[in-house]
Amino acid sequence: MKKGFMKLVKDVTAAREAWDELPLKFALSMVLAVVVCEMAAGALLAGYALQTQLLILRLAELVVIGLLIIYFNVGDNLGLRRPDAEGVRVFALLAGMTLVLFTALLLVFRLLDYPLLAHLTAPPWLAGLAGLLLMVLLAPVVEELLFRGLIFRLLRRSFGMVLSVLLSAGCFALMHGQPELPQIFGGIVFALAYEWSRNLWVAVALHAAGNGAILLLALFH
């Protein structure tokens, strides 16, 4: 595992020197696709439960964005290189460690009655297998593709790293409703992870672990 982690660090260092700009046509197509999916979901899924709406919406967005990535051949550019077996183990270890750390911190904050946790409680409609699928798979992948793979990368073309991280984190928080500290903090962490690694799977792993910690916390509510 140690050798695999060192190999990942070495690959990351090399990848940092080869981060090309995203094609403008891909960026515009991705924005248009997300807008169309959101509008279509609002019109066609209005009578369904919120969980069902979000599941269908995120799945549709994932399919459409995936097709665009294949069509424009930007997978490597986005940092979606297929990891080898050792890379998968490293990412799994990273996600597992993050999940344990986040859960422990959230439990400590709950014991201290920290007010921040008012914004970190999983709503009842996220319960069950469907909620787990949405929170730890579909949402992290789609949101990282959009907010780090697209928005952060576009901002990075014109602004410095710090400002791009903050602006993309603000956009991420706004997407979740009224901007709150937990979403802003998460957006900053995920963007910094992507900036450092140039590998979107790292940000996805951290995002999934953070969402998983919130679901685990709900079990102790």
Image: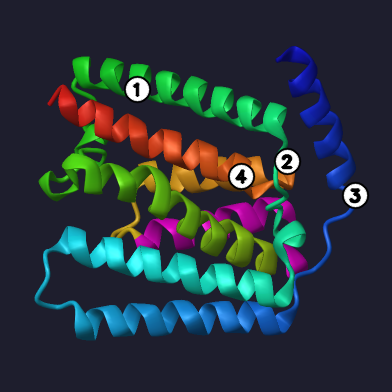
Task: Give the colour scheme of this rendering.
Answer: rainbow
What amino acid is at disc 4? Trp
Query: Disc 3 marks which residue?
Result: 17
Q: Earlier in the sequence, mark 4 or mark 1?
A: 1
Q: Secondary structure at mark 3?
A: loop
The part of the image, by quadrant, that contains residue 14 is top right
Q: Is residue 121 left or right of residue 175?
A: left
What amino acid is at disc 2? Ser
Q: Earlier in the sequence, mark 2 or mark 1?
A: 1
What amino acid is at disc 1? Thr
Is 205 drawn above or below residue 60 in the view shown? above
How crowded is the residue under tag 1: few (<14 C-alpha within 10 Å), some, or many (20+)? Answer: many
Query: Disc 2 marks which residue?
Result: 197
Q: Mark 2 near mark 1, Cβ–Cβ under 8 Å?
A: no
Query: Disc 1 marks which residue?
Result: 103
Is 30 drawn above or below residue 74 in the view shown? below
Q: Is residue 160 magenta?
A: yes
Q: CA distance from mark 4 to mark 1?
A: 21 Å
Query: Disc 4 marks which residue?
Result: 201
Q: Is residue 83 left or right of residue 47?
A: right
**Disc sitting over residue 20 in the figure:** none
Q: Mark 1 near mark 3, Cβ–Cβ under 8 Å?
A: no
Residue 181 spot, x, y in % from top left: 37, 44
Q: Secondary structure at mark 1?
A: helix
Q: Residue furthest front?
A: 85
Q: Earlier in the sequence, mark 1 or mark 3?
A: 3
| Extent of the magenta region | 156-175
What amino acid is at disc 3? Glu
